[in-house]
Image (spheres, rainbow, N blue to C red):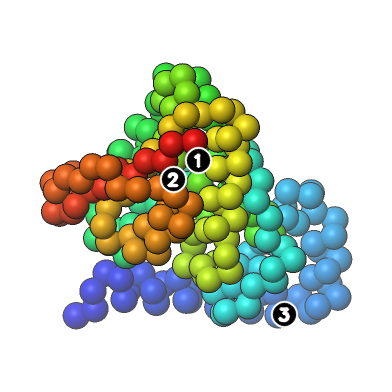
Amino acid sequence: MEDKNQQNSKEVLEEFKGFYNDLKDSGDSQLLEMVQDLPFTSIEKITSAFAEIQAVRGYVDRKKLKIRTYRSGELGYIAWRHSVIYRQEYDLGDIFEFYLIQGMYQYLNECEGRGEVWVIDYAGKVQGSIAIVETEPGVAQLRWFLIEPEFRGFGLGKKLMETCMKYCREKNYNNVYLWTFDELDAARHLYESFGFRVTETKTSAPWGRDITEERWDIEL
């Protein structure tokens, strides 16, 4: 008997075949005519979808990559992608999604948006993120650092870190800290290269299994 993931994969593939056949039957010239009369936002979605297909296949046009501040509505998307990827790669449970959403609520409400959120934009779609949240005067927390698997290996993590650390210095923060866990080897190496050091560790099961959390700090 097929498991649920196999069944879902088959359904998704069949749905894609349906869309593909509809587009193929339309013909290239007719398809272009259909698209060029659509609203800008619709064209952006279609372009983004084609770009993502290429990325999944291993081709990323670096000229289309840019780092920008987030737009309204993208925090929810960032929380969703964190939840999905951290479940797939680190087997974190549903409570991790609550933790993310709770932190974003605090940023928007209790912290009143003091700080900034940046995203990796590729053809109009978010493919990574990082944030600085001011937790008290002179102190900030680095949060929500993630890069989609297809966009790793291009130096984007370093660029995100450079962006947020430049911001912290411009805002005259005295201390910047972050929480991570000891399985995130690539991120931990990057934090260390920027001068962060481990200042606290604790082992617990906050998101469905035992992990060793680490606090990293840097004095500016």
Q: Is residue 30 above or below residue 46?
A: below
Residue 21 in sight: yes
User: Which numbered tag is attached to residue 144?
Assistant: 2
Amino acid type of the residue that numbered disc 3 sits on in the rendered structure: Asp
Real-space Cα separation, disc 3 to disc 1, in angstroms: 45 Å
Return the residue nearer the eye: 98 or 166. Answer: 166
Q: Residue at x 19, y 80 (%)?
A: 1
Q: CA distance from mark 3 to mark 2?
A: 43 Å
Residue 125 drawn above or below residue 105:
below
Whole-percent x, y for residue 193 in the image? 46, 57
Label placed on residue 25 = 3
Residues at marks 1 and 2 touching, judged by CB atoms closer than 8 Å: yes
One can see residue 75 in this view: no
**Whether label 3 touches label 2, CB < 8 Å:** no
The residue that mark 1 highlights is: 131
Q: What's the residue type where badge 1 is placed?
A: Ala
Q: Residues within 10 Å of mark 2 (few under 14, many from 20)?
A: many
Residue drawn at 57 percent across, 65 percent down: 155
